[in-house]
Amino acid sequence: MAMQKKHHIGEEDLYRFQLVTDCQLSPDGQYVVFCLQRVDKKTEKKYSNLWIVPSDGGSAGQFTYGDQTDKQPRWSPDGKEIAFLSNRGDEKQEQIYLIPFHGGEARKLTNMKGNFGSIEWSPDGKRIVCTFRKKDKESIEREKDKQKKKLGVVSHHITRLFFKENGVGILPKERWHIWTINARTGRTKQLTDSEIYDEYQARWSPDGKEIVFCSNRSDDPDLDPDAVDLFIIPSKGGNFRKVETPFGPKTRPTFSPDGKLLAYYGREGRGQWWKLTRLWLVPADGKGKAKNLTKKFDFNVSSYTINDMPGSVPMMSPTWSKDGKNIYFQVSHHGNTVLKSISLDTEDVQTVIDDKGVIGVFNLDKEQSKIAYFHADMKDPGQVWVHNMASGHLHKLTHINGNLLRVLDLGEIEEIWFKGAAGNDLQGWILKPPCFDESKKYPSILEIHGGPRVQYGNFFMHEFYYLAAAGYVVYFCNPRGGQGYGEKHSKAIWNNWGTVDYDDLMAWVDFVEKKPFIDKQRMGVTGGSYGGYMTNWIIGHTDRFNAAVTQRSVSNLLSMWGSSDFNWTFQVEFGNKSPWENFENYWRQSPMKYIGNAKTPTLLIHSEQDLRCAIEQDEQVFVALKNLGVETEMIRFPGESHELSRGGRTDRRVERLKHIRRWFDRYLKDK
């Protein structure tokens, strides 16, 4: 049989890739339901449906059909039904639907107007708890009036400090609250209400009598965002009580099987973003102090390994063993996100699944004989896997994109540990083009991640393979300032951006350019968000690169304050003083201070609805470079947010990639 001819990955392949966006193991451990997202090239819309695959192996079968978004499937405790969110009835309004597993049509359970957060079945299967944010009355009234709907919003009346959110826009007046829904009648009950406070991440107690949730109940949460606490409310409604814990941000509380303990993730203290996220334990009745279970370990409890093919990699709640003696949780460390467990008796940590790559969604069956989970790596954007708890055997259940991946020559990637500027150990990767020839000299591109407190790692990056397919050596690393390498590594750039992070990146470039296949005269650099900040910093501090592409960047910390949806909290990273209190400190760390030195031809890419790094940040760079006579262009994408490169409309993602390649080809390729 003749071998299939290999192809190089292209920008249009973004239309062909399908993504697993959730997976859930049935209570009896026999099946996994998962969401599969696809792109309709004609309409440029993304749709997702539910699929079913046997946990012991076999072909996956489509379970729901239609051009809509079906997501967040959750098995009923008896495994007879699946609850899920869908916009099948109204493209702009999701509702909760129930579908029988063994046959039958999905029925709409709710008729609510607003946004759903998380949903979870009660232990007895009679109710569903959800977080929900109602639509503002003005919006509902406008939709009922055809003329008002046609004219659109007249004005926004802003009264709160945090008034906008990237990917959302101007926030509604309504807040996130907790609701319960009768799983048979659809009757709803709102348990919490406030014009000031949000409640989120609601979870049932094992007996179904209580619900734990997170909330910031300070006088003004927008002025003290780290003041998050745990609260417990009767599931039938009534007064809630606070569970005493150390001050600091908290997330994802879960009850122990006997209901006596709560596990949660958190950091201790105010405004210390460099700290590691830890796993904590606290008595649910409040009669005892909280305990930091992972205090002695220098790893971050998180799922923060980034890529540009966003599958199902959320931070999962602490998951208890059924005997209450162990807790399972994710850890992002040294370029991987792995699954670990900790013994409450010995406080020893064991690695449960440590395959090179990233573990996202994971869950166990009722008897905890299996773990179903999402796993992705450098060569695969993600599949559904199952782990047999008794044997330790791992089995890949899906082969999404298999036909496409089989015919793609992605090139070879090499993982390297090298010494940073201070003799510190750093991890990096070098991606070589397909059909690589060791005897040739190649142009190269340095990629810099955003964050900064995330990590690059063993995760499929379409952009990297796309540039490698165009004939570039693509290389990337994790300099000081990111997560995944301990607390000291993370804290290194606290109130000191553009220092040791820049030094580490230059040490990486020094290391790579010594490779015999690197052409020192044809080197480029690019990055987005904080990576865009570093790209701006680089062109103001060195001429060693022949071309740069700065994306959704930060350039001026003075104007970044207040223009970002991070709002005033941006100052926490920079001495926790406002710009008028510490002007020179902000300016010292701003790339705009040094832009007058820039000579590197630079392309700027920004989304017009980016509320994280406002477009004025790149406009300042563009105007400055034009004024300086430096070759520059700006590409603006209407209707897109900060997430363009990962989740934007596909035609715009394609256009973005074409412009990046065009710019580098212009300055790094021989004419």
Image (cartoon, rainbow, N blue to C red):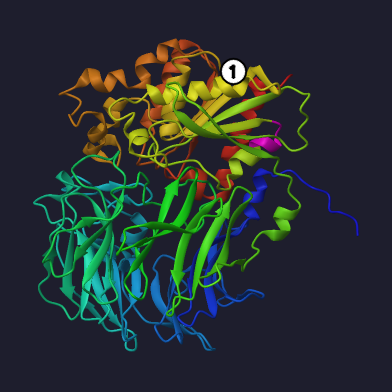
Q: Say which of 386 and 650 sits in front.
A: 386
Residue 186 in the image: state x and y as whole percent. 32, 84
For disc 1, the marked residue is 546
Q: Which span is picked out in magenta?
A: 467-471
What residue is drawn where x is 56% and y is 38%? 656
What residue is drawn where x is 71% and y is 31%? 471
Q: In the displayed structure, does residue 195 sit left or right of residue 12? A: left
Does 200 sit above or below residue 235?
above
The quadrant the C terminus occupies is top right
Q: From where the camera sits, is residue 175 visible?
A: no
Does 38 sit above or below residue 13?
below
Q: In the displayed structure, does residue 670 sit left or right of residue 165? A: right
Badge 1 amino acid: Asn
Tell me the SS state at disc 1.
loop
Residue 16 in the image: state x and y as whole percent. 66, 55
The quadrant the N terminus occupies is bottom right
Q: Quadrant of residue 578?
A: top left
Residue 161 in the image: state x and y as whole percent. 18, 44
Q: Quadrant of residue 444?
A: top right
Residue 247 in the image: state x and y as whole percent. 15, 50
| Label 1: few (<14), some (14–19) or many (≥20) C-alpha neighbours in 10 Å | some
**Residue 56 included in the magenta stretch of the image:** no
Q: From where the camera sits, is residue 620 visible?
A: yes
What residue is drawn where x is 11% and y is 52%? 218
Which residue is most to the right? Answer: 1
Q: Say which of 4 and 267 sits in front.
A: 267
Q: Quadrant of residue 11?
A: top right
> Is the stretch drawn in magenta largely helix, strand or loop?
helix
